[in-house]
Amino acid sequence: MRPAAEQVAQSLREEILSGAIASGARLGEADLAGRLSVSRTPIREALSRLAAEGLVEIQPNRGARVASWSAEHLREIFELRLRLEPYAVRQAVPNLGPEQLDELDELAARMLRVGGPGRNQDLSALVELNRRFHGLFIDAAGSPPLAGALRGVTHAAVVTRNFQDYTPDALSRSLHHHVEMVAAARAGAGEWAEAIMRAHLYNARATMIGGHS
Amino acid sequence: MRPAAEQVAQSLREEILSGAIASGARLGEADLAGRLSVSRTPIREALSRLAAEGLVEIQPNRGARVASWSAEHLREIFELRLRLEPYAVRQAVPNLGPEQLDELDELAARMLRVGGPGRNQDLSALVELNRRFHGLFIDAAGSPPLAGALRGVTHAAVVTRNFQDYTPDALSRSLHHHVEMVAAARAGAGEWAEAIMRAHLYNARATMIGGHS
DNA sequence: CGCCGCTCGGTTGCATGCAATCCTTGCCAT
DNA sequence: ATGGCAAGGATTGCATGCAACCGAGCGGCG
């Protein structure tokens, strides 16, 4: 069996990212310990890690809450992503092997399917697919410091459950950005992929906080 | 009395940054618990936090070691800093009050004194002063996400005990960069400060990993 | 009637004991 | 002699119990 703290962290991560635990909700150690059938020690360990990832906020002697972001924070986060993530994509392109390109293809295609208009549209599924898509590029960049700097920051857009707010047009653009990004990666054109990522982020920022710088 | 875990984290931080604990050294929980007269629990807590800051690396079931960086990592870290820290400085300049400007002046002046050539040159003192100088700008930028992304990354250059490697010329440039940065900040010229910070980082990178991109 | 202080319930923080895992060293077989 | 392996020691990971701290609600005082 795997380390318990890791299990707990993974469970909480999924529950937070999927929205099963509301943003700002209180995370009592005793509660979680009972719910997940472990002692409070690995709970504390897990909360500590999640705090490092920026998913929860810990106030001394006052427990942990699911992190919540203000509009101002979101603006700052996009400013960061715009400075780092296009660069990460450019670095990642030469490192992508065939199997990773296939996986990116798969992810982009599935996002097109579940995100496209129609009755089988499933915006909540998009969250996880999108996370894996961006995460794959970030990991492929092969820079632990870069990955560390970005990891805490990509979660924010997820927790705020962004896809609900996209206009149909903006959502369509976003999904096709993914496809184009994979095409650029397959062509080995790092700068092309970088440019698309930049557009992708501007598009996202515009829908989440309203356009202008 | 303050929370014990925080005390432990602070102690270890200072010992690591000052070089009292060598880079790559093993950090046994029982050892530290005995040395700092607390139980292993706050030790684990502190190590976890320091790992989040990037100062130590924890391998499951194999304990914690002081982080060490390869030349490749250093290159990546400077790539990150070049993308974030000049921006942070520009954002910080409008937020700097008189007392903070005075503190920056003080720090820059003291660095000139202890870093200047002569028998009272004290390179190890530079480490802490430099850390506070850069940290003050980062905090003043007023963006928690930005601060979080940078915090793990500014430590690296410190732990590698960089000032030893500076040529006298490069060190002199670096110290005067600080002074000029404060002058720019006092003039309210964010873009000037940003430009100097960029030069400052290029200068540092050149001495640490040898120039070219 | 309003404000301050106090007690009390609940939660976090810390210490300690035990179980699981890993590294080492010595032995045996090839 | 060398490679594999197993037992021992040491260290990390987890559970549990106790102490310190925080917040809420009530009573007393101005």
Image: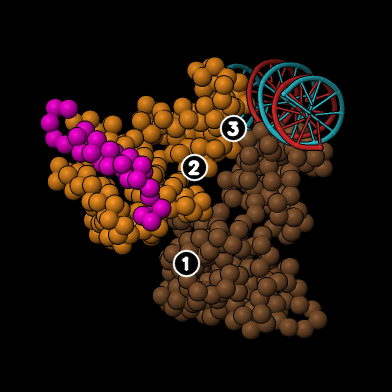
Chain colours: A brown, B orange, C red, D cyan
Numbered range of the magenta stretch:
B92-120
**Chain at tag 3:** B
Residue type of the residue flagged with mark 3: Glu
Q: Are marks 1 and 2 on the same chain?
A: no
- B49 sits to left or right of B68: right
Which residue appears at 15% of the width and 42% of the height?
Answer: B168
Estimate the x, y position of residue B117 in percent, counting from the top left. 13, 35
Q: Are marks 3 and 1 on the same chain?
A: no
Disc 3 vs disc 1: which is toward the camera?
1
Badge 3 element: helix
* Viewer-nearest residue: B136 or B172: B136
Graded by Cα atoms within 10 Å as few (under 14), some (14 to 19) or many (20 or more), the crowding at tag 1 reads some
How far separated are the C-alphas under marks 1 and 2?
A: 23 Å
**Chain at tag 2:** B
* Viewer-nearest residue: A86 or C22: A86
Dots 1 and 2: beta carbons under 8 Å?
A: no
Identify the disc placed on residue A82: 1
Look at the image and tell me whether residue B161 can be seen: no
Residue B104 inside the magenta-drawn segment: yes
Residue type of the residue flagged with mark 1: Leu
The image quarter in which residue A191 lies: bottom left
Q: Identify the residue position indicated by label 3 in the image.
A: B45
Estimate the x, y position of residue B162 in percent, counting from the top left. 28, 41
Q: Identify the residue position indicated by label 2 in the image.
A: B53
Graded by Cα atoms within 10 Å as few (under 14), some (14 to 19) or many (20 or more), the crowding at tag 2 reads many
Which residue appears at 27% of the width and 56% of the height?
Answer: B187
Badge 1 element: helix
